[in-house]
Amino acid sequence: MSVLAEFEALYGVEPEGIWAAPGRVNLIGEYTDFNDGFVMPLALPHTAVAAVARRTDGVLRVHSADVEGGVVQLDVDALEPLASTDWAAYPAGVVWALREAGHPVTGADIHLASTVPTGAGLSSSAALEVVTALALNDLFGLGLSRPGLAVLAQRAENAFVGVPCGVMDQMASACAAEGHALFLDTRDLSYRQVPFDLAARGLRLLVVDTRVKHALGDGAYAERRAGCEAGARALGVRALREVPHAHLPDALGRLSDESIRRYVRHVVSDNHRVERTIALLDAGDPRSVGPVLTEGHASLRDDLRVSCRELDLAVEAANAAGALGARMTGGGFGGSAIVLVEERAADAVATAVGKAFAEAGFTTPRIFPAVPSEGARRLRNGHEMHGKSP
């Protein structure tokens, strides 16, 4: 059944529109976004889709095709942060954040369906937030920009759900362009669309979903963030973004706490890796990005210590099979790795990774190409939808 038909079956009326927002993979720049740093994500073809209609009675009804259970009904005036961490908190948090910012959202009926793998480090939650924010922005005529929507969606996840994420995931979902990676400065939210047509160069970027579920709300992510903030205070800077890579040895020498020193080294060096990657892509040399990815994985594994055995094995097996480079992507502790590979070798590398997982007794990974795709968009208006899908 289509999202349109499911909405009509649930709520007895047609939706006013259907919207989509993608998940993402991050090419390079991990744990840098909450340090005012640089990141370089790209949108996936996998999306969260929302059929939505306005209400004027203060009632919010949400339903997911992907979660068992019926419609969740909430009072928009009674939405409270941290009251729940289940899936409905993400769209509800967006409504709360919009109303907290003074936007007149008077209720909605929402039906969601997503193809973004959950727990894979591919921003399934940001996709839910951004698609809800875009739909409500359009329906209520709020006039918010794409970065403005991303910031509100981030606030929903930070303050309402309780996950202290940076803004990268929401910006990637809201602002990415097909065939490009998004070079984002998270301090001022300025960004540049960088051409990233790997197929034209005979290359492919693979995602290896280890199927090890990660949960950023379990405290490990928050501990790294707090450690980075402590490092910035100790170095007398507003954020680690302000520590030049050339001055990193001096900065590390001024830090006495071993874990904070590791976190600072990772963030400053990963910001530099983003800059190196941009330079290589601008020079038309995407193959040389491979070793930068592998270097980034070593930093995430050894300095930030957010990898796991499955992620390490994915990187090791891919590189041993001839990949140009690989690294974990996302928050870590499970989730996914990315692999840059010659297109002609992609199947062999994927087979080698699957074989390594089988020999280690791990769950078979899900491996698929990361095709740089379009960001959030409206799929259909209400008057266009009768008898059509999605």
Image (spheres, helix red, strand yellow):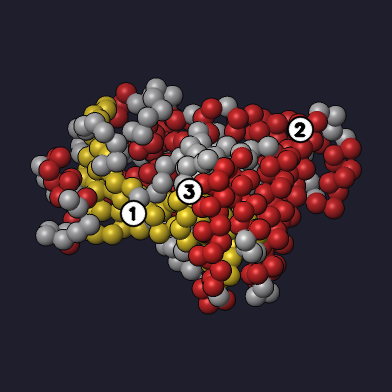
Q: Is residue 247 above or below residue 321?
A: above
Whether the residues at callouts 3 and 1 have beta carbons within 8 Å, the answer is no
Q: Name which residue lies at 29% across and 36% down.
A: 67
For label 3, the residue is: 365
Q: Amino acid at mark 3?
A: Pro
Q: Residue at the location (21% across, 45% down)? A: 53
Amino acid type of the residue that numbered disc 1 sits on in the rendered structure: Ala
Which residue is denoted by mark 2 in the rendering? Answer: 260
Q: Secondary structure at mark 1?
A: strand
* Mark 3 or mark 1, whichever is nearer to me: 3
Which residue is found at the position 22% from the left and 57% from the top?
A: 390
Identify the residue under disc 1. 20
**What secondary structure is marked by label 2?**
helix
Q: Is residue 152 visible?
A: no
- The answer to whether residue 30 shows anywhere in this view is yes
Q: Residue at x 70, y 59 (%)?
A: 292
- Marks 1 and 2, the one that precedes in the sequence: 1
Check disc 2 and give the amino acid type.
Answer: Ile
